[in-house]
């Protein structure tokens, strides 16, 4: 495989709500929630933000970091489960806002939380086949969680954008392999015209998240003949803080390998943005030569695993755009009434 | 706003595409078809303005325009862009007390409104304070 990452960018809205604030409304014990989910607070989109605006900010950061002419982007795919329109692509809005139009192909993807990594794979194929010079894959969401549901503590907003191109002097990391594992497992879904998803509670764990994440990771390790010791970092989809750490342990990765890419405790689950932002956080601090594992998970269900080797180019490029921690640390707390207004939970 | 009008203005609203006169080099935003300085001698071409500027003046809106009721109190500012032209835009992601005349801002992509619940969504530029 001769493709790599030319640039990446993220965006996380600045508003946060603490688990304590949500627990207070529903009469739950916040310490129990925090301990059960390993989440302290989550990001909340502002009243003028949605999946498209988050994707545009991340995409603009990626273009800035890559230092490429956006007219050379031949494909844009955006994965989300909260596209602003049911019919009308988010991808065209983003393509226009980064001045990549009109000579490109674009589409929206949907596969619960893994549609962004599915977009990376599509771009890898198109680049490898020589059909496009650069492809942009975005995972962006303003996740919905029904008021009072366990999801409300974690359903957050954020996005990550990756520009894929042929390996060369401009790639900051090479993608040396990808492996996917997919089955029909109804652990989480949202029916048409329904505002909130439903989930299978504990069923989302063993037969869903763990089975797919572990199978995809093991499949990739087998394919590339690598072991966890060959990796400096491991990033997993993070619906909460607990699942990814447990998956890392099951696979034989240490907490030190998994912790730098784990952001759910401070920003919540950014759904399609989750693995992408985790990977970006690790790229923000990795050294040339480091090997990274990234495994996404999308309910329904499937996982995409990637093995990525950081190249020398990263040190020249990564300061060109804001980093993940810049966004994580820039925050303003809101209370539940303001949260309810921002998320349009109030009936007027 | 009618859909065709919004669509026509997408380059201006998404990417601050204005015009530059090849004769007097003045930059205009929004773009015009005739240079107000050179008239018939003007040669206008599309020009993408840099997304940076400064707050020239501002007001805090408490009685909102339709569609902005949920955002009060919000800041509406005249922003002097680095390239010269000034424009009026909301300053997003801020508490009104945070804004001062002279503050540096960057223009960001935000949701401006929607035609109706089942209508088209309008996107465009808002200012955001650049924190030192």
Image: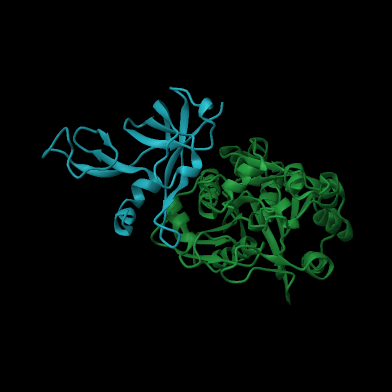
Left or right, A116 with reference to A208: left
Q: Position of residue A98 (x, y in %)?
A: 45, 50
Where on the picture, by quarter, is residue A71?
Answer: bottom left
Please name the residue shown 36% across and 39% down the image: B49
Pick the front one: A22 or A6: A22
- Look at the image and tell me whether residue A310 can be seen: no
Please name the residue shown 55% across and 64% down the image: A127
Q: Residue furthest front?
A: A348
- Look at the image and tell me whether residue A36 can be seen: yes
Left or right, A338 with reference to B76: right
Left or right, A59 with reference to A272: left
Q: Position of residue A198 (x, y in %)?
A: 70, 66
The chain that appears green in the image is A
Q: Is residue A145 above or below residue A9?
A: below
Please name the residue shown 59% across and 39% down the image: A322
The quadrant of the image that shows the C terminus of chain B is top right
Q: Residue furthest bottom?
A: A184
Where on the picture, by quarter, is residue B4?
Answer: bottom left
Pick the front one: A338 or B11: A338
The chain that appears cyan in the image is B
Q: Residue furthest left?
A: B40
């Amino acid at each position: 495989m001769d493709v790599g990452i030319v640039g990446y960018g993220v965006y996380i809205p600045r508003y946060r709500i603490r688990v304590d604030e949500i627990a207070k409304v529903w009469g739950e014990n916040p310490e129990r929630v925090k301990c059960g989910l390993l989440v302290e607070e989550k990001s909340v989109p502002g009243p003028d933000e949605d999946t498209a605006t988050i994707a545009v900010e991340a995409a603009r950061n990626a273009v800035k970091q890559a230092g490429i002419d956006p007219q050379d982007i031949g494909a844009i795919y955006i994965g989300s489960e909260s596209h602003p329109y049911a019919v009308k692509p988010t991808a065209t809005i983003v393509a226009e806002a980064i001045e990549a139009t009109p000579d490109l192909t674009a589409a929206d993807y949907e596969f619960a939380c893994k549609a962004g990594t599915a977009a990376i794979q599509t771009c890898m194929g198109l680049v490898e086949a020589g059909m496009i010079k650069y492809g942009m894959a975005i995972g962006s969401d303003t996740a919905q969680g029904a008021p009072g549901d366990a999801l409300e503590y974690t359903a957050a907003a954020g996005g990550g954008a990756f520009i894929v191109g042929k390996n060369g002097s401009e790639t900051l990391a090479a993608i040396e392999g990808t492996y996917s594992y997919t089955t029909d497992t109804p652990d989480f879904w949202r029916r048409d015209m329904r505002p909130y998803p439903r989930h299978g509670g504990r069923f989302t764990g063993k037969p869903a998240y763990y089975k797919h994440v572990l199978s995809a990771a093991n499949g990739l390790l087998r394919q590339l003949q690598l072991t966890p010791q060959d990796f400096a970092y491991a990033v997993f989809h993070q619906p909460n803080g607990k699942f990814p750490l447990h998956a890392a342990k099951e696979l034989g990765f240490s907490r030190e390998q998994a912790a730098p890419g784990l952001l759910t405790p401070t920003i919540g689950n950014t759904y399609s943005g989750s693995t992408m932002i985790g990977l970006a956080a690790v790229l923000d601090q990795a050294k040339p030569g480091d090997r990274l594992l990234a495994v996404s998970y999308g309910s329904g269900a499937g996982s995409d695993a990637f093995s990525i080797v950081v190249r020398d180019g990263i040190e020249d490029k990564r300061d060109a755009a804001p980093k993940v921690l810049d966004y994580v640390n820039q925050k303003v707390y809101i209370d539940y009434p303001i949260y309810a207004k921002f998320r349009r939970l109030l009936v007027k | 706003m009618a859909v065709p009008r919004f669509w026509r203005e997408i380059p201006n609203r998404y990417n601050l595409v204005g015009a530059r006169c090849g004769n007097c080099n003045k930059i205009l935003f929004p773009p015009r078809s005739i240079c107000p300085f050179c008239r018939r001698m003007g040669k206008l071409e599309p020009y993408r303005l840099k997304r940076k500027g400064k707050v020239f003046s501002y007001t805090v809106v408490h009685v909102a325009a339709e569609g902005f009721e949920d955002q009060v109190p919000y800041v509406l500012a005249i922003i002097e862009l680095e390239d010269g032209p000034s424009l009026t835009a909301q300053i997003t992601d801020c508490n009104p007390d945070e804004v001062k005349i002279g503050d540096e801002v960057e223009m960001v992509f935000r949701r401006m409104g929607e035609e109706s619940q089942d209508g088209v969504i309008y996107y465009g530029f808002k200012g955001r304070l650049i924190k030192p």
